[in-house]
Image (cartoon, helix red, strand yellow):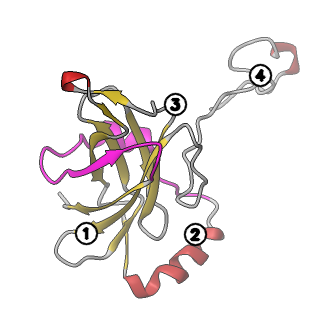
Amino acid sequence: LPRDPDPAHKGEADSLFAPVTIALLPSPRCAVPASAAAVRVTVRKRNDGRRVANALVRVVSDNGQFAAHAVTDAAGEALAIVADFPMSFTGNGGSVSSALPAKVTAVADPASAVLVDDADVLAALAGAAAQSSGWANPHVLAAAFPAPAAGAVEVQLSTRAVAAAEVEWRAP
């Protein structure tokens, strides 16, 4: 943005009339496709346990071949979906496994993170339903806050079950 609103330039890449592909992140309540691995994540602030809304969640397999990210909602929850995940893996000695180890991390901008007590989750979700701006941008968060070296939570990625993780956010 801004895009050119002149209909005479509709063939140009920055034309208002040219479609733009935008990748949308899944809601924590999204159905998980059968051919995907997924991790449901709750992010909590270190020390007081409040949920952290607007946090970037990253999931990366230990072999580095699979990754996904998501942003927590008003309840501090996210669903990271790894699309097109294999149903099995060959391990050492020819063994077969349906799961792959991975790590989950979370970062947030202290200026835009919203902390929510467990008792206030329903009110936070209701408020977010009426929200029309101020959403966290995952690309900005990823550029500003690298994945933390410590505090990663280990999970098993699999198409057979959705993994769950509680990640602790350590405010800078």
The image quarter containing residue 52 is bottom left
Q: CA distance from mark 4 to mark 3?
A: 29 Å
Q: Nearer the viewer, mark 4 or mark 1?
A: 1
Residue situated furthest front in the rendering: 94
Image quarter (top left, top right, bottom left or bottom right) of the C terminus: bottom left
Q: Is residue 154 above or below residue 164?
A: above
Residue situated furthest bottom in the rendering: 119
Task: Give the crowd class for mark 3: few <14, some 14-19, many >=20 residues within 10 Å.
Answer: few
Q: Whole-percent x and y of residue 160?
A: 46, 47
Q: CA distance from mark 3 to mark 1?
A: 32 Å
Callout 1 amino acid: Lys
The mark nearer the N terminus, 4 or 1, is 4
* Residue occupied by mark 3: 84
Q: Nearer the viewer, mark 4 or mark 2?
A: 2
The mark nearer the N terminus, 2 or 3, is 3
Q: Which labelled disc corresponds to residue 88?
A: none
The structure residue drawn at horizontal position 23% and vertical position 42%, both measured from the top left corner, is: 147
Q: Is residue 85 above or below residue 32?
A: above
Toward the viewer: 67 or 100?
A: 100
Q: Which labelled disc corresponds to residue 128?
A: 2
Cβ–Cβ below 8 Å for labels 3 and 1? Answer: no
Q: Nearer the viewer, mark 3 or mark 1?
A: 3
Q: Which labelled disc corresponds to residue 45?
A: 1
The mark nearer the N terminus, 2 or 1, is 1
Callout 2 amino acid: Ala
User: Mark 3: which secondary structure?
Assistant: loop
Q: CA distance from mark 2 to mark 1?
A: 20 Å
* Residue occupied by mark 4: 18
Task: Give the crowd class for mark 4: few <14, some 14-19, many >=20 residues within 10 Å.
Answer: some
Range of the magenta residues? Answer: 133-161
